[in-house]
Amino acid sequence: MFMRNKSRISALIVVITIGLVLSMTGCSGGNTPSSEKVLTIGVVGPESGGSAQLGQGQHNAIQLAVDEINEQKLAGEWKLVAVFEDDEGNPTKSSSATNKLIQESKANIIIAAINSSATLADMVVTERAGIPQITPGSTGASITEQGNEWIFRTAANDSFQADALVKHAKEELGITKIATFTSADDYGQSGANLLKAAAEKYGLELVANPTYNNGDKDFKPQLMSIKDGGAEGVFLWGLYTEAALISNQVQQLGLDVQLFGASGMAAQKLIELGGDAAQGLILTQTFLPDADIPEVQEFVQKYTEKYDMDPIPHGAQAYDTVYIIANAVKNTDSSNPEELRDALRNTEGLNLVTGSPKFDEKGNDIGKRLLITEIRGDKFELIKAIEAK
Amino acid sequence: MIRYILNGLPIGAIYALVALSYSFIYAASGVLNWSQGDMVMLGAYIGFTVYQILNLGFVPAFFISMLAVAIVGIGIQRFILRPLRKSNAPAINVTIATLGASIIIRNLALMIWGPDAQLFPFPVSNKPISMGSLSITPQDILIVLIGILLMIIFQYFLKKSKEGKALRAVAQDRYAAVLMGIDTEQSDRSAFGLSAAIGAVAGILIAPIFFVTFNMGAGIGLKGFVSAVVGGLGSVPGSIAGGFFIGIVESVAGGKISSGYRDAITYTLLILVLWLRPTGLFLKKRKQKV
Amino acid sequence: MNKNKKIYLLIILVLLLTLPLFVSNLYYLHIINLVGIYTLVTIGLNILSGYTGQTSMGQAGFFAVGTYVTSLMMMNFDLPFFLALLIGVILTSIFGLIISIPAMKLSGPYLVLATVGFGEIVRLVLLNWTPVTKGAAGLTGIPFPEIFGLQIKTEKQFYYFIIIFVILGIYIAGRIAKSKIGRTFSAIREDDLAAEAMGVNVAGYKTAAFVISAMFAGLAGGLFGTFSGVTSPDSFTFDDSISFLCMSVIGGNKTIIGAVVGAFVLTVLSEALRVFQGTRLIIYGFILIFTVIYMPNGLVGIIENLKSKILMKKENKSME
């Protein structure tokens, strides 16, 4: 039943030789000539797997920003280079990809990742290596609660959104009973907690708080229980595919409720997929392609010119992130990770697509503007813009 | 309670179709095609392309999609199953190879159709018809009807046609069928092709309510397989009953017990069924083939 | 064991122990450490499938239990790593025992699906039992292990730490295979009815195989948690179970060394394919298909075949 010992040994030797050859070839990779100042940005995101649309949107926007900055020499003497790795939304693969970017591509700074669990895994790697990391996509609350001084977040601020939404529901629409219906991932779970806190703060009654798993298709059972609870407003916290399905099924069940949502589902696709049923949905976002803001218009025009499709909000945040990095490296004129980190922390005076970035001591971007919008016809219409304090 | 049961019917019909495609391949060829869920996805995408992009109409979309996906299924039989049978590889190798095919198909779809979900509406109304607290949409009714119609045609084909009879003979005893001069290669081919086509129909039926995404096959495929086993793998009526059963269980468990644990409840039930009645809930106990 | 083999073994051991001296790139060391952890999971699978003919497509479930229990013991009760690991492994083997109750009655697709179900149940519980498992965000700040006051925290230290467990795992698995239990396992794989007829307690042995395979996965999980520093349900999906099964089959599921080869080749392959970006997973799929068709007994099987061919040629020549 057992292989003879000898062949076992020969197999092992083969394995080790492969390993050694592999490691030798890796060490020889030289870097760019020293005459040019190059800052390498390592980017990790899910370019395949369930959140591929976010990863690919992020990829496109970052490449666009890098090309612009290099062309117009916006980073002083520095040339930016972006290297992309796919993590399939899997934390283990994400941390391997981050390791690769730092060790092999000699990334000076990391943009990672979309899925909160992947971002948390990457943070272990960047913290051990002492390399700054910015996440333009992960909103999970725990990310900036780790006491990790290397992490920055340019994603929308969820507690700000939950607060604004609940306040709007109460003060403008006179809603008193609400339900939350959130995805069972880090994004949805922290959203549910923030909404609950906001409901308590404004004195609204939370009558039901079911969840769903990503990839679910049938939401009617949960919606029926929401209906039984008598909620007037249902707050969704998740991605656009599920949100569109939910709004369809709300209509099919004949539920008479006002739907609310947050930036995670803000995409033109939500309107397209949701059709009739999505009309009137109110959601907060940081980026609106038709918003009458010069920075937004310029970005949308360039993006659609290059990729022949509309940018997604994650893309806008990633685009801004590159500009924040360019500003930091221009100011310190160094690729030293500690100096870069301190320069990031002192970011100010930029007017970008999603606001005027400014980081708090935990690394959250508190300079984002928040737009309360409503789906009317085939677009989001601005109800109110709240500038950051 | 009744409305939860009613709500489980359309998804149950789709699970039933997918379960049927698993059962059928297993009965006729003795192996499982783990890329069956991706046939559902491909069916939906091809239907979407023909109907929404090429504008060739809904009925042609149905048939073109079935045909195209059947060809993919036959391709899997030809380039994966056949060589594996020739080299006498263990059953687990078929599992790994078809999982490999699943990875390829899924990522090709991602390259071709992109990462965004696509809308694929049915040419019927999506507005609910209410009766008291119960409501159902014409679209749901159509899904259940087409599903049931297809199952009947399929059962008829197996019972009456020459190919169907040959397939059933192979399913009962592969070795005896070979002795009787039945071409098992041909029956493998029919099994893979037909199952893929059934998957494609499931894909088109599910598309208008659930949209089309490149990774929709994973979840539906697994649930279809669970339905087949719970109902009785290898049996047509068993698989159909299993599909509706799982559809209803999910709806009731999601609404009445816990939405987060819904799938966990389904799987616990599956393990219990396997433990207590390995031949499935809806079949008479029979001696399991060793 | 003759002298030659002892020398070979010694060389291998020296090579393994000095590996970090050649590999200065921490990324490679990180991947090799992952290979070590996956090797342990795959050994467990090989004991199950290679020796008793059972399959598990829910190994990520056991791996997850080991990771979470070990990490939680360290975080919530301040237990030292080895004690936490012990509890993790014991709990995982209890799970193995429970799942073996329905599993020993099943075979083929039924067994596969039951194990898939188990893996998914574990993942869903981890996702939804928020007060304990912290839900989707998962555990963060999992402490490093400590031996005699020395904290294991760099990739290099982890390399030595993990390699000791891997060598120990290979040794124990080898001892099991050579023992009476191992011989009975393979008798069951060849023909469980015959084994039963000969008075072998087939059910008992199948249960033992499940428990042993769960223990290996639990051990690997305990190492994985402290090595990663964070963990979440996203690391224990159905896809992860599939990739463990692929390691077992691609490497060769009838031998222990097959587990090492499978874990190494597939982990390194999926990293090496990164140069192909978007087409990477498609290529990966083709490689899987190609391997199981043309190397039905895994990579180790090919080496075996080649060797016996060479031996045959030699013999033919000497006969001429």
Image: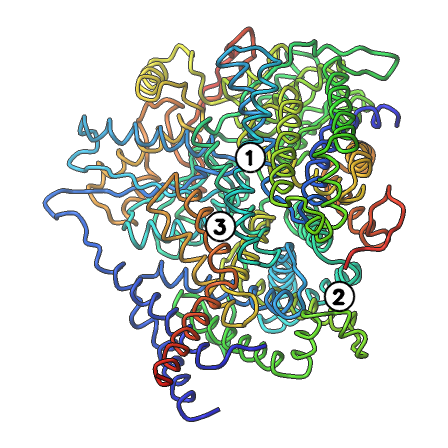
Indicate whether B155 appears above or below C282.
Answer: above
Q: Position of residue A87 (x, y in %)?
A: 44, 44
Q: Which residue is mark 2?
A: C97
Q: Which residue is mark 1?
A: B215
Tell which subunit mark 3 falls on: C
Q: Position of residue B219 (x, y in %)?
A: 64, 37
- Distance from disc 3 to disc 2, alpha carbons, whole Å, reads 33 Å
Disc on the earlier residue, 3 or 2: 2
Between C60 and B19, the one lying in front of the other is B19
Q: In percent of the image, x 36 and y 53: which residue is there?
A: C272
Q: Residues within 10 Å of mark 2 (few under 14, many from 20)?
A: many
Horizontal side of residue B12 vs C288, given as left or right: right
- Distance from disc 1 to disc 2, alpha carbons, whole Å, reads 34 Å
The local secondary structure at tag 1 comes to loop
The local secondary structure at tag 2 comes to helix
Q: Position of residue B35 (x, y in %)?
A: 58, 41
Between C116 and A27, the one lying in front of the other is C116
Q: In percent of the image, x 62 and y 35: which residue is there?
A: A214
Q: Residues within 10 Å of mark 1 (few under 14, many from 20)?
A: many
Tell which subunit mark 2 falls on: C
Q: Residue furthest left?
A: A35
Indicate whether B236 appears above or below B270.
Answer: above
Front position among marks 1 and 2 = 1
